[in-house]
Image (tube, rainbow, N blue to C red):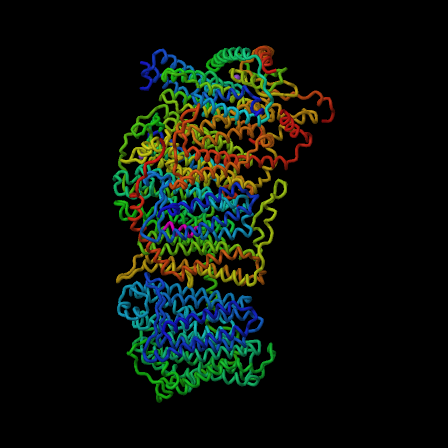
Amino acid sequence: MRRWLRYPLLTLALLGLWLLLNESVSPGAFLLGGMLALGGAGAFAALTPPRPRVRRLAAVLRLLRDVLVEVVRSNNAVARIILQPGRAQGRRSGFVLIPLDMKNPYGLAALTCILTATPGTVWVDYDAARSTFLLHVLDLIDEEAWVRIVKDKWERRLMEIFE
Amino acid sequence: MTHAADLPLWAAVLVSLLLLVGSGLALIGSIGLLRLRSFYDRIHAPTLGTTLGIGCVLLASMAFFSVLQTRFVLHEILIAVFMVITTPVTLMLLARAALYRDRSEGSTEVPTLPVDAAQNERPGV
Amino acid sequence: MSATLLSWSVLVAQFFLVAAMGCAVFRVLRGPRAQDRVLALDTLYVNAAILVLVFGIRTGVTHYFEVALLITLFGFVATAALSKFLMRGEVIE
Amino acid sequence: MADATLLLILVGLPFAGAAVAGLMPTGARNAASILAGAVALAGLGLVGAAYPVVSEGGVLRAEFAWMPTLGLNLVLRMDGFALIFAGMVTGIGALVVLYARYYMSSDDPVPRFFSFLLAFMGAMTGVVVSGNLIQLVFFWELTSLFSFLLIGYWHHTAAARDGARMALTITGAGGLALFAGVLVLGHIVGSYDLDAVLAAGDRIREHPLYLSALILILLGALTKSAQFPFHFWLPHAMSAPTPVSAYLHSATLVKAGVFLMARLWPVLSGTDAWILIVGTAGLITLVIGAFIAIFQNDLKGLLAYSTISHLGLITLLLGLNSKLALVAAVFHTLNHAAFKASLFMAAGIIDHETGTRDIRRLSGLNRSMPFTSRLALVAAAAMAGVPLLNGFLSKEMFFAEALSAEAALPGVLNILPLAAMLASAFAVTYSLRFIHGAFFGPDPVDLPRQPHEPVAWMRFPVEILVLGCIMVGVLPAATIGPFLDVAVRSVLGDDVPYYSLAVWHGFNRPLVMSFVALAGGVLLYLLLQRRLQSGEDGPPLIRRIDGRRIFERTMVFLSWRLARRVEGLTGTRRLQPQLRLIVGAAILAAVAAVWLRGLGPGNLKPSPVDPVLALIWMVGAACALGAAWQAKFHRLAALILLGGVGLVVCITFVWFSAPDLALTQLTVEVVTTVLLLLGLRWLPKRLQVADERGPEVLTRTRRIRDLTLAVAAGGGMALFAYAVMTRTPPELLAQDFLRRAYTEGGGTNVVNVILVDFRGFDTLGEIFVVATVALVTYALLRRFRPAPDSVELPEPQRDQLEADAARMRDGEAGRLADWLIVPFTLTRLIFPVMLTVAVFLLLRGHDLPGGGFSAGMVVAIAIILQYMIGGTDWTERRLRLLPQLWVGVGLLLATGTGLAAWFFGRPFLTTYFAYAELPVIGRIPTASALLFDIGVFALVVGATLLMLVALAHQSVRGHRATPRPPAAPATREAARAAAAGED
Amino acid sequence: MELVVSIGIGVLVGSGVWLLLRPRTFQVVIGLCLLSYAVNLFIFSTGGLRSGAAAILAPGEAGSLAQYADPVPQALVLTAIVIGFATTALLLVLLLAARGLTGTDHVDGRERGR
Amino acid sequence: MTGWMNHLVMAPIVVPMLAGSLMILAGDRWRGLAVALGLVSTLALVVLAVTMLAVADEPVVRIYRLGDWPTLFGIVLVLDRLSALMLVLAAVLGLSAFVFSLARWHRAGAHFHPLFQFQLMGLNGAFLTGDLFNLFVFFEVMLAASYGMALHGSGTARVRAGLHYIVINLLASLLFLIGVSAVYGIAGTLNIADLAMRMRDIAAGDRAVLEAGLAVLGIAFLVKAAMWPLGFWLPGTYSAASAPAAAILSILSKVGVYAILRVWLLLFGAEAGASAGFGGGWLLVGGLLTIAFGSVAVLATQNLSRLAGASVLVSSGTLLAAIGAGQVSVTGGALFYLASSVLAIGAFFLLIELVERGREVGADVLAVTREAFGAGAEEDEADAHEEVGVAIPGTVAILGSAFMACAVLLAGLPPLSGFLAKFAILAPLLGHGDAGLPAANWALLAALVLSGLATVIALLRAGIEVFWASPAAKAPRVGLVEIAPVGLLLALCVALTVGAGPVMGYMQATAQSLHAPQDYLGAVTGAPARAPRGGE
Ligand code: NA
Ligand code: NA
């Protein structure tokens, strides 16, 4: 039982998943959903994941908002690149090697999700030994700028949340 | 579309807009798949569809069914969440696979492996 | 009015999405490399999921939601497997 | 004794004896021979017991139902004709048993010999007392079978094997022809009962099928009786032990053909066809057999050809279409049995005592074995037709018939008297050769053994037979007369012509012919003697025509070379032509069916084309065609395109109101992709090689043919599908399903209710299919051996290992765990999510899209994902999967749900549903169908995992076997350790 | 609509048959998959094609064909899909085993003319 | 028929179902348990089948409504004479093959026991079901298990032949599905009896489509029945299979024949209106060609197993041609032939392995694969090579007699039932009349006679080679459990011969009810409806 309760956030999320799937908030759904969520967390625990710690929920929400904005912005940017081949002439795409301070796997995962969700950037490779990751950028104006964007805009805030 | 007849106009406009934007983005993304020249460029294109593209359609669906059934239809959120956590797995694996394949073929387009300094110092390896 | 508007926009959206699928399939056929084909398949899956959602709006039935859900949640497993195969030469090591 | 008992014992006793003898130990020579002798004597006794009734014109008859509806009953029937044959079979049988007791070596497994001999005796008795023609065929083939075993008794010699095989092939084939003939006869008569058939003579001869029946039946009779052109098997059957030859090849087996012809003589003879076939065969055999016999250096070979000739004589007589000739035939049959059996025995004694049967080596045995010599002399004289011996009498009758028949016969047979005389002269010659060659002349030199008289008991049977020859020859009317009369009377009825069995009929033409033949024979022998003594084996002129060689060559050609050629032409062992044929046959069958009836328009108006779906299907078609195009050289592309097709199919299901199908299709799609990818690892890299295939033209032709077939199949199927879609029957089963689904099935998702309730039995069967396939897959993979070029690690992995090794210090953490950190984290998070979705799909299946199958697939996918990202070792250290347990439990749960209905007195799979009121939760449906669906779920999880995991494990085996690149021995282990160490 | 689906089935069957007649095991597997898609669609279509009429009843209702698509072919297709999946898996494993034991991926277990 | 008797019809499916499922749970580790379960199950099946044979031998056709649904709505099982006959054959063959396998084959690969049970379950289900789609499902159960049987023991030859077998059967299954669904699309039912009732009233414009579907369905059946030119897969597959597998497989081709008997006679009988007699000529011609090809194949081989496989073709061809003749009494004869040839071929397949064991070709019998991975032998292979059985005295004589019996049976020679079987087909075919015979009858007569001759020649050659020509062949070690099943099957052939009268009576009654299926149709379509039941 203790093992199951080790991941309260996940349990809650699974309960939410259940309720959304069933589109119901009846007691029955809660009861069954709760049981299933506990079971799901148990299954998760069986996979021996590293212990996630999520702090500062408010920071999470702020981050989410910024990500959304960024998603919309880069959607627009990439759509333009695709639709206007003329402008793309001067465009340069390329790889950027970014050093990271963050080690937490959940933080890294979240960073990947963010970078993937914003069109124009793709996480390519990660080197744990050197703590660097390789990013491919569609519109690479300045490598340094990208390093800064990632580190300041995302990594720092993710470290606040996960470490 | 008889079932949509009782939909208020504002909702219809909203849903229509979201649908058009969403599917338009998906189309643009797929066009990008055709137009962009290298694989590493192309890998960015579908993200339009997987983010805002599907997002808009999900919003449209939520709005449409919520208004139509006069209750909150929210389960579309799940799709969005799933998209966010599954897409990186595919794209990462794919991009890295491409990188390695290109490297092993000696392509100049991709960065070479950063070689360990300590290793370099040792002679004869 | 609502019905007309919606039916046209649904139709256009569907055309967009089918066109998008066409683009993706073209890329699958064309290649040139295996990674391009896999990427295109992934795109195809996403476009299909959106198409199913739009179809749900078109018919006003929610039964198809799960299909879209499953495409997003499981379609990626296929492309992930393909990518893994490209990278390592085998899916499960 | 009642008829039935007597006849049953007569036929059954030898078989029973055979069974007992067969069970005796190998060395029980005396016991077996006593048993056999007793059985034979008992049989003879029974025949004797029947004589009083039969001699009065009575017929013993017993009928037992066997297959009464088809007119086949066991009818045992003994009239005079059957009686004398039965007497011959048992009587000579008894003598042969006695002879064999002393002839057979104690090294041989003698009980087996007697077992076969008795069985043969039974079969032969069965033939002669059959009152039903099918039953006659039955025993007829048995005689072939047991004679095969007897001829092949010394099967360590090639001659015995070849002789036995030839005998069975010829007589067996003849028996099959006889079978067909008897069936045709049955068609004509309407019964197989002998009495009925014999009563329907006119009907038979006038029937349009008479000739067919006749030819088929004669094929049987003539092969058995070794008539030209089927005569050649008999000499080779001489490789049998001599008692066998004496019994089978003089007295019994070969007489079966004669027996049959005489038996059916009243109904089949009398037509030109009969005369032509039987007469010609007999005539040719008579002459050729006698001629060849002269030139045989083997005593038994000489006797064998002589037998052929004498059988020809009998056949010829039967073919003469005269009642007197029939009498003569029957008479000669008996006479021949007596002298030929004794001669064979004599030959056997010579062989036994001297160790050879070669006439050229033998000489002057008269001095060392005088008794045997006298006996053989008398018997040979009988064979040559010397007066005062039995052979003379029947030969005399034969000459008379030959003379009287002359005018009435068709062209070929007009030389009859001349041929008869010639053959008789030959008979004298070979008889002389037998006697003179073996017993007279100088003392033998260089024989394998020192000859002396055999033991008295071995000579005794010969003595009896020779005595018979003399008695009949001297006092025919008193000895054989009554028996012959009874026999002939039962064939011809009261219409027996006058014949006289006197020794002296006055000085007439037949007598002259006899003397001419005797003189001619002696003369011929004198002329030929020198040549024969040194000559090579075989007759002049026709030596080259070796029946056996022709037979063997024909057999090899027909039954081997030709058969193989024909099989190659009309069949194939290759897959592609077979598939082509099946596809072609299906197309043809459908086209033919439609062609015959004509196709009208359907009763449903097709709905208008939705451009979106049309476009989707253009995408789908592109995928399908692309897959067809790419599958050879770009397997991955084909696989991806297949995924595209699957997706389009899935959308089509969505489009046309089948969400359940779409869900299932999707999950199956994913698992199939993973599965095929797992398989691709073990397939060779296929590269385009220019001249991989044959000539360009051939390849193109093949492709055009396949393309045509593919287009035909596709076009045909499209048309067919359109035709079915645009039609609907007036009353559709579906109406009921929709109506009852909720009210009686308790679910709103009708498809699911059908699957787990209305047609749950289909689903039950289906999960057993899945389980079975999983088990088969597992079993197959347990024995999996990859091709040598696939054993080592895949190329990308080797590259990466080398690259990593090159840039890393030894022992430093590997890269596998590094770059997988993010996917690792995410997929572990996805795991419980997928499980929850699975439960969701499972529980709602009865009311909304979902169900056990798709839920099970979802769980399987969730686990496979962990395998993919985490690797096999990692995953299995954390999840104890026990797929076989899942499979077993799933099956039992589903079956058990079905069985539970039995306890409520309901049929299997009767479902139960009700709504239960629970605190807090409220009303929930409880349906036994859910339990069933859970069984399906468990099975699907287990079976899918069993297959995928078994396949994945091959990679693990591969890794264990592959030596790592030397530079990085610990890299992978370190990586695993790192991955594991995250806990 | 019937026309589109028929032609679709036809194209799948054509491609499938073409692949089925190829000499390489993998081609045959893909061909059988395509054929099985086509057959599934065919089974599905025999009940008629109707849009937006999934046979999911409103609770308490006795449905009728006027409102709902024919559920029987759907149930049959589900069974067919599952069986098809299982047998495809088996065929795949078998072709791997054949390749391992015979050293070739030719359907006859030996290259032609050898 | 009340109470527990009521469920008798279902039992032949349930028993192996449960046994097999339990065996999976037991796994290969507790093989003793699996053996015990298997024995119980196969024996029970024999008892059940014989009971059902007794029950079925009356005009009443028994139906079992699965799920208690009305007959035309749910799936029904139907027990009539034909299905009872097939059940008995399957059960007897199953028992024999199972006992035979206990000597060593059951250890030659994983999961033999459950696969064997599922094989029997599939067979029994196919024989009992009255529903066309359910027939498909049980065909698949049966085929899936047969894949396992055919591949049991693995090895190059098996895998190579198995690949063909599976691909062809997958194609045939697809054809089956096309046929079944076309039937549903046009006639609106899946119940065979219901379909038969509806045949007459099919609209003229729809009949072509329905018949085309049924023709495709027929092709699927004929592929399984191995009609020429659709059956080239059979000799290869059967000869590559292990002995017990081949024995049980030998009834599989008869399932195709069964399906044709059942479906064809029901649907295209006299009641079928315009469709009556559909395709009968093709069956006859195809059957004749199959006999011809089978005979040629029999002659063209010196391999005993392949010879046995070719004999299966001959027997399939004989059955198809006899059915195609379309006469009641000929069908009766065909049924007798079916029983005789199934038992004989089963015995022959078992025997071949014992016979060849003495000839040192048995060295590769288990065809154990070399461990390419170098990981050492798998545990179940360890005991695979152990010698089985003792050299019982007279082994060669016993084997020789058994071989002779099999040869006589296959060739249709006296004294065993093979001869009576051919007679039972031919006698009514030729019948009685004043006129000549139609060419088809002549052809069948010639085909049966000549195929017999071909078999004689081939078996003679093979038998002499095996038993007589080999120089002092050392007596093979044969276990009692191996020879006993052969003996059982041959003894049944003897019983068929001795009891030919009553057996033939049964067969004729079966044929009559097949050709005039009023009892069947009445029982299925007119069965009492479901009592109201269920919730609330
Ligand atoms: Na991105
Ligand atoms: Na229809």
For the point 39% across and 16% down, the residue is: B71
Q: Quadrant of the N terminus of chain D?
A: bottom left
Quarter holding the C terminus of chain D? Answer: top right
- A143 displayed left or right of D426: right
**Viewer-closest of F474 and F231:** F474
Q: Observer-nearest residue: C48 or D861?
A: D861
> Which residue is nearer to you in this view: D67 or D616?
D67
* Residue D52 drawn at (x, y percent): 36, 80
| Magenta stretch encompasses residue D147 | no
Q: Which residues make up the magenta segment?
A: F82-90
Nearest to the observer: residue F32 or residue E41 = F32
Looking at the image, can residue F485 be seen?
A: yes
Residue D286 seen in the figure: no
- Number of numbered discs present? 0
Quarter of the image holding residue D878? Answer: top right
Q: Position of residue D626 (x, y in %)?
A: 45, 30
